[in-house]
């Protein structure tokens, strides 16, 4: 009596195996409908793991009536029905006198946006001086994977092409230094233009209808982009205090590339539309549409004073390198203490230098071959570990302040943060 049942059991097993084999292509496709939640290293903290969205990217030049046309790049949640690998090679133009370089990234070029789950909060990203958004793609791709749209542009006058051209000769260097001085005004204003561009793109007549939630906006950036973020968020510039500091600390002023401002003071005043004798306090460069700030190794903090920092009440995250010679850690500590934001945090990567936001050397052998490895490595840290930590803190912060994510909020509580070689201070979590 047992034999028939055994025969039926074997038949059922064979039938089930046949069905599974027949469905294998379908199951494989289904398994690829969401990206794998992995970080850059196996020990990546939770919010450094790839988010639930595929990442798309596209680039376009915006003519909006300004003589400073912006070439913007967007990173956004995308569709990926075929389960393609997120892989892209960004090309960085260095102008006519230098070869281009490529940087490997993780995104789908020109992928169809995932409109169905939108709209998504907006991140306006300002790269460092002489840099392009693609230099910092690792973080911007990561943020898009968590349901944010990133819009970023190379600021005309201080792009990589402009920077490289400054090495051609004295005349070209003078042009760059003047542009760098004027960028203290133009960069924060560019942020406002980018928000307006995003508003236009996401309207019913726009190319990205329904993709962007322009009622929730954060501005962020590293180095000069950190200055840009704070100025765009409304921290006022005290030019008189800056001039006094620069005169008293000429070496530091030159090291931080700020001595150009006073050299081109008349040009700066003309762009501001004020008398050079009345530049002690600049008109506000802030945009009221901004809801939060992330400043990474923020440079040029001596353009602000304590009264100006105290005016900042938006949620703010600061990231510093403990061994940063360009932006001393104590200066970032001072900003954290001086701002009035009830929700704020400061992360210090002890013994790290200035290049927290930059690409890795593995991602761009071209830059290594050109002798620029100092821009993509650190003398102490494994850069992948630093990137995982920067992704973790930034992602959790933005999920909390822009999306009200309770788990992300809890992850930023001081009692929840314990990483080797990380100093963390926070309020409001």
Image: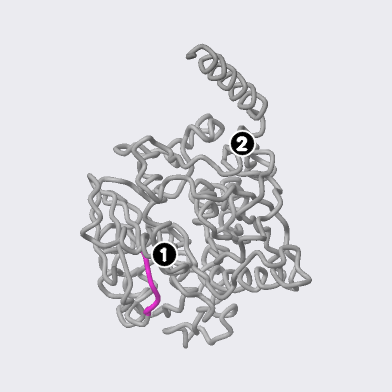
- In the rendered view, does 378 fall on the left or right side of 60? left
What span is colored magenta in the figure?
312-317
Label 2, on which residue?
Answer: 85
Label 1, on which residue?
Answer: 405
Question: Is residue 230 positioned above or below 24 on the image?
Answer: below
Q: Which corner quadrant holds the C terminus?
A: bottom left
Q: Position of residue 407 (x, y in %)?
A: 36, 60
Q: What's the residue at 31%, 58% (across, down)?
A: 411
Tag nearer the camera, 1 or 2? 1
N-terminal of the two: label 1 or label 2?
2
- In which quadrant of the rendered view does residue 244 lie? bottom left
- In which quadrant of the rendered view does residue 66 lie? bottom right
Q: Secondary structure at mark 2?
A: loop
Tally of marks: 2
Which one is in front, 203 or 317? 203
Residue furthest to the top: 3
Question: Is residue 276 positioned above or below 336 on the image?
Answer: below
Q: What's the residue at 59%, 59% (across, down)?
A: 152
Decide whether the magenta segment is chiefly helix, strand or loop: loop
| Residue 254 shows up from this direction | no
């Amino acid at each position: 009596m047992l034999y028939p049942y055994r025969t039926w059991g074997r038949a059922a097993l064979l039938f089930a195996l046949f069905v599974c084999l027949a469905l294998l292509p379908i199951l494989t496709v289904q398994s690829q409908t969401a990206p794998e939640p992995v970080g850059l290293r196996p020990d990546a903290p939770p919010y450094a793991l790839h988010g639930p969205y595929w990442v798309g990217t596209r680039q376009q030049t915006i003519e909006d009536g300004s003589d400073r046309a912006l070439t913007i790049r967007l990173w956004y949640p995308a569709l990926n029905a075929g389960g393609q690998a997120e892989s892209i090679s960004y090309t960085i133009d260095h102008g006519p006198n230098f070869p281009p370089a490529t940087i490997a990234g993780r995104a789908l070029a020109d992928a169809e946006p995932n409109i169905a789950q939108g709209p998504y909060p907006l991140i306006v990203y300002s790269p460092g001086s002489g840099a392009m958004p693609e230099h910092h793609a690792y973080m911007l791709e990561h943020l898009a994977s968590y349901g944010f749209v990133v819009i970023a542009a190379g600021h005309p006058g201080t792009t990589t092409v402009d920077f490289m051209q400054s090495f051609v000769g004295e005349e070209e260097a003078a042009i760059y230094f003047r542009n760098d001085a004027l960028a203290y005004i133009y960069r924060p204003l560019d942020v406002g233009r980018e928000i307006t561009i995003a508003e236009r793109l996401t309207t019913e007549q726009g190319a990205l209808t329904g993709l962007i939630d322009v009622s929730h906006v954060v501005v962020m950036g590293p180095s000069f982009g950190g200055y840009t973020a704070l100025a765009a968020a409304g921290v006022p510039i005290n030019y008189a205090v800056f001039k006094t500091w620069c005169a008293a600390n000429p070496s530091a002023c030159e090291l931080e590339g700020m001595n150009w401002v006073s050299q081109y003071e008349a040009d700066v005043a003309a762009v501001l539309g004020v008398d050079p004798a009345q530049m002690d306090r600049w008109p506000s460069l802030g945009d009221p549409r901004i809801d939060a700030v992330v400043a990474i190794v923020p440079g040029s903090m001596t353009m602000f004073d304590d009264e100006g920092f105290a005016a900042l009440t938006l949620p703010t995250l600061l990231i510093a390198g403990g061994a940063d010679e360009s932006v001393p850690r104590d200066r970032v500590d001072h900003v954290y203490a001086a701002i009035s934001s009830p929700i704020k945090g400061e992360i210090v990567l002890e013994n790290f230098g200035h290049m927290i936001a930059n690409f890795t050397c593995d991602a761009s052998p071209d830059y290594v071959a050109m002798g620029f490895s100092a821009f993509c490595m650190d003398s102490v840290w494994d850069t992948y570990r630093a990137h995982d930590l920067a992704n973790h803190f930034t992602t959790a912060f933005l999920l909390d302040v822009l999306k009200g994510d309770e788990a992300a909020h809890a992850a930023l509580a001081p009692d929840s943060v314990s990483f080797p070689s990380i100093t963390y201070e926070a309020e409001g979590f």
